[in-house]
Amino acid sequence: MGWTSYIPFINSSPSPPKPKPSADGGYIAPDRHRRQQCYDARDAFFRCLDQFDILDSVKDADLAESHCAESLRGMERECAQSWVTYFKQRRVFEWRKAKQKEMLEKEGAEQLPEHIQLPLPKPRKEY
């Protein structure tokens, strides 16, 4: 426990409990309730980013921090750090995916029927 935990206005919100290691040393995944809290915090952060027209909160970290600090802290408090990173990156990926699909549709591309499968690439030869 650091010295800031003794100052109430700096550490006013309780941090989530640390994950408990299992018998094999790994960590126990969050239960449904904890996951839902994380998803709600993520959605609140993304709504804030949308409000200020910020797409990439990694690249525009200063801008995201200045406008959405409270909701970002909420997501960081409720979610594992690896989830926070994943959600931030996934947001940009999904946006790019939607733009790519939109562009292809404008060019007249059509989606292949589900029963058609593209051939898999041939495996590389090992030398």
Image: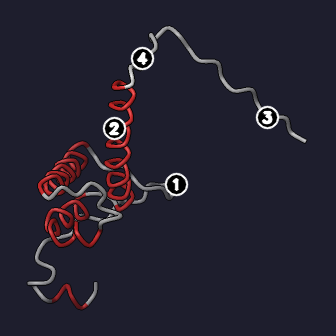
User: Dividing the picture into quarters, in which one does residue 15 lie?
Assistant: bottom left
The quarter of the rendered structure image containing the C terminus is top right
Lower position in the chain sequence, tag 3 or tag 2:
2
Q: Residue 2: x and y, percent? A: 28, 87
> Residue flagged by tag 1: what amino acid is it?
Asp
> Residue flagged by tag 4: what amino acid is it?
Gln
Lower position in the chain sequence, tag 3 or tag 4:
4
- Residue 38 is labelled as none
Is label 2 in a helix, a strand or a loop?
Answer: helix
Q: Residue 11: x and y, percent? A: 15, 80
- Residue 24 is labelled as 1
Nearer to us: label 3 or label 4: 4
Q: CA distance from mark 2 to mark 4?
A: 15 Å
Lower position in the chain sequence, tag 1 or tag 2:
1
Task: Specify few, some or many for label 3: CA neighbours under 10 Å numbering under 14, 14-19, or 20 or more.
Answer: few
> Residue flagged by tag 3: what amino acid is it?
Arg
- Residue 99 is labelled as 2
The quarter of the rendered structure image containing the N terminus is bottom left
> Residue flagged by tag 2: what amino acid is it?
Lys
- Which residue in the protein does label 3 denote? 124
- Please report contact status of discs 1 and 2: CB closer than 8 Å, yes or no: no
Q: Nearer the viewer, residue 26 or 89?
A: 89
Q: Residue at x 53, y 10 (%)?
A: 116
Q: Residue 39: x and y, percent? A: 22, 47
- Which residue in the protein does label 4 denote? 111
In the current view of this chain or complex, which residue is farthest to the right? Answer: 127
Q: CA distance from mark 3 to mark 1?
A: 37 Å
User: Dividing the picture into quarters, in which one does residue 63 lie?
Assistant: bottom left
